[in-house]
Structure formats: structure tokens, C-alpha cells
Amino acid sequence: MIEIVPFEAISAGQRTEAVRVLVSAFAHQPAAWSSLAEATAEVGKFFGNTDRSALAALDDGVLVGWVGLVRGYSHAFELHPIAVDPGRQGQGIGAALVGALEALARSEGALSLCLGTDDDFGGTTLFDADPFPDLLAAAAAVQPGPRGHPLGFYRKLGFVVSGIVPDANGRGKPDILMAKRLQ
């Protein structure tokens, strides 16, 4: 049985697991956290920072995933990041984490939740493509590619593409922006 708990409630060992999960979940993305030091710094941002919160998914006390919340605007919060142990993906853990994060955001008065999902590895039709001159048309037409990308996962949870940041991670490597109405 998966239990969702606030980061403040996890142990030092579970915090170390959160670092490992972050690195392993993003191992296929060159622009993500590629070292334990980078991942440790990212996890650390969610402790003692009132602009951030995180939730952990525990399975019999073992951390198997986590999701972060960044309070950047008064009524629109950001989901950043979400990481589920690769061996546990596809089991509903990510969806449970996002659902719990949405409930937390709603309880704090957020009207929408946004996120950015990079494609620096060939996961969508925007990879290695030139979205200019019509960025909005390119954003509207984006689809997951054969290499897999979380775009489909987010769409299943009700997120829609709200824009793109072309070349965010280098030429032809965009950040795909998505959002979801919460209230």
C-alpha cells in the first residue's frame, strides 16, 4: 500500500533515497540531475523553504517516488519535479503523487498548476525541430515520440500544453509548458 507523506516527515535514509530516485528517474535526460551532488542540492531545496513543499510516496517505509511544489505566483503553483523509481513506474505512483499535490495546492488557494517538461532526448515531435515562426501552432501539435516522454502521462492527468520554450536546453531541445485548472 502506497502512503503519501510530506517531506518533513521522511527520515534521513528516505531523504537519501529521494536523491537516488531523482537521479535514476531522470537518467535518460541529459539536462537533468546527473550527479548525486546535483540531486542532493535539489532535494535540499524542499526543506526549510516556505516557497516549496514536497510529498513522498512510501511503500512499506521505502521511498519509491516524490513530487515537489513551487509557489511562484499567488494563485498558480508549479509541479517541480516529479520522480518515481524506474522499477516502479507505470503502477499509479506518479498519478497518486500528482493527485495529492493538486489537493495540497487547492487547499492553499491555487487555481492552477503548471509544469515544464523538457525534451532534450528525442521524446516528442518537437525534438530537433524548428518551431519558428509559429510557436503556438508547434505547441498545439506536439505529440510524444517513440522514445517515450511524460507528455502523455501529464495529458492523462488533465494537463494541457500551454506553450513552449524553444531551445531551452540547446538547439531543438525545448521545454514544453503545461497547465491544469484546479478550481
Image (cartoon, rainbow, N blue to C red):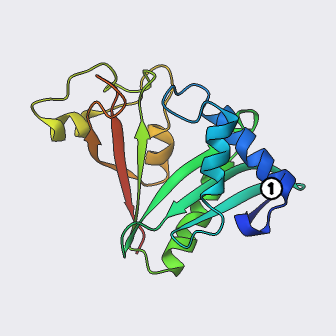
One can see residue 124 in this view: yes
Quadrant of image for the C terminus: bottom left
Count of marks, rendered view: 1
| Residue 68 picture quarter | bottom right
- Residue 158: percent from the left, percent from the top? 43, 55
Secondary structure under tag 1 reads strand
Left or right of 118 in this view: 137:
left
- Residue 129: percent from the left, percent from the top? 26, 21
Q: Is residue 45 above or below residue 22?
A: below
| Residue 26 picture quarter | top right
- Residue 51: percent from the left, percent from the top? 51, 69
- Which residue is more in the foreground, 176 or 154? 176
Q: Residue at x 50, y 80 (%)?
A: 108
Q: Is residue 105 above or below residue 98?
A: below
Q: Residue furthest left?
A: 133
Left or right of 180 in this view: 8:
right
Quadrant of image for the N terminus: bottom right
Q: Amino acid at mark 1?
A: Leu
Q: Residue at x 37, y 74 (%)?
A: 75
- Residue 22: percent from the left, percent from the top? 66, 41
Left or right of 160 in this view: 64:
right
Count neighbours of disc 1 (C-alpha within 10 A) and say few if under 14, some if 14 to 19, many if 20 or more: some
Q: Residue at x 42, y 69 (%)?
A: 182
- Which residue is more in the foreground, 168 or 149? 168
Q: Which residue is mark 1?
A: 58
One can see residue 84 in this view: no
